Amino acid sequence: VTVNKFCPLTFAAQLNEILERCAKESTANVSLYVGKIFEMAVITLLKQLSMCYRSISWTRLKQISSDALSCNGYRLSDIDLQRIIALSVYYGNVCCRLSHAKQLLTFYDGNNFESQMFTNCMVELNAALTKIGSKANAD
């Protein structure tokens, strides 16, 4: 996945093409790496979307990324996607806020007070999502 190439609207198709090519050309078991590849892909996609959108609906985000987020039987759930977003905010990859009430992801400049406040909220959300995900996987 190339960060330098700006292509948010065709990103999903390109990622799927890369994964299929790796599966064909390599003897390695690509399914072992799909989870981490998708995490990196979501972070890259968020960075690219933050350059052209001030906000994006949850439905539209999933629509743009739907092809890339399901490959070889692996599919990211909403909770997994929210966890990746929360971690990307926590580690400073992208500054955004996820509103569950409005079903909206809003991007921010990382140098203001509001962004810092939302970063703290995302850390708390990540902890809650990790607990939910662990419980769901245990069942």
Image (cartoon, rainbow, N blue to C red):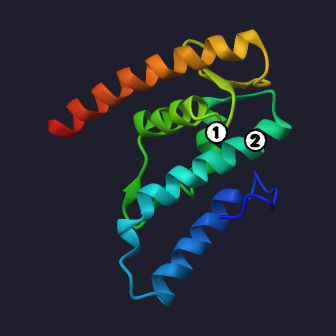
Reply above or below: 118 against 20: above
Q: From the viewer's perspective, is 51 left or right of 56?
A: right
Q: In percent of the image, x 51 and y 34: which residue is there?
A: 87
For the residue pair 97 and 12, the one nearer the viewer reads as: 97
**The disc labelled 2 sits on which kind of residue?**
Leu
Q: State the image coordinates of residue 74 (x, y, percent, origin top left).
A: 38, 58
Q: Marks 1/2: CA distance?
A: 9 Å
Identify the residue under disc 1: 61
Labels 1 and 2 touching (C-beta < 8 A): yes
- Label 1 environment density (alpha carbons within 10 Å; few <14, some 14–19, many ≥20): some
Q: What secondary structure is marked by label 1?
A: helix
Q: State the image coordinates of residue 129 (x, y, percent, origin top left).
A: 37, 26
Reply above or below: 48 against 86: below
Q: From the viewer's perspective, is 26 left or right of 92?
A: left
Reply above or below: 71 against 40: below
User: Which residue is situated farthest in the right direction here?
Assistant: 52
Q: Earlier in the sequence, mark 1 or mark 2?
A: 2
Q: In percent of the image, x 65 and y 39: which residue is there?
A: 93
User: Which picture quadrant has residue 105?
Assistant: top right
Q: From the viewer's perspective, is 22 left or right of 95?
A: left
Quarter of the figure with the C terminus: top left
Q: In percent of the image, x 81 and y 27: which residue is there?
A: 54
**Disc nearest the viewer among 1 and 2:** 2
Identify the residue under disc 2: 49
Q: What secondary structure is marked by label 2?
A: helix
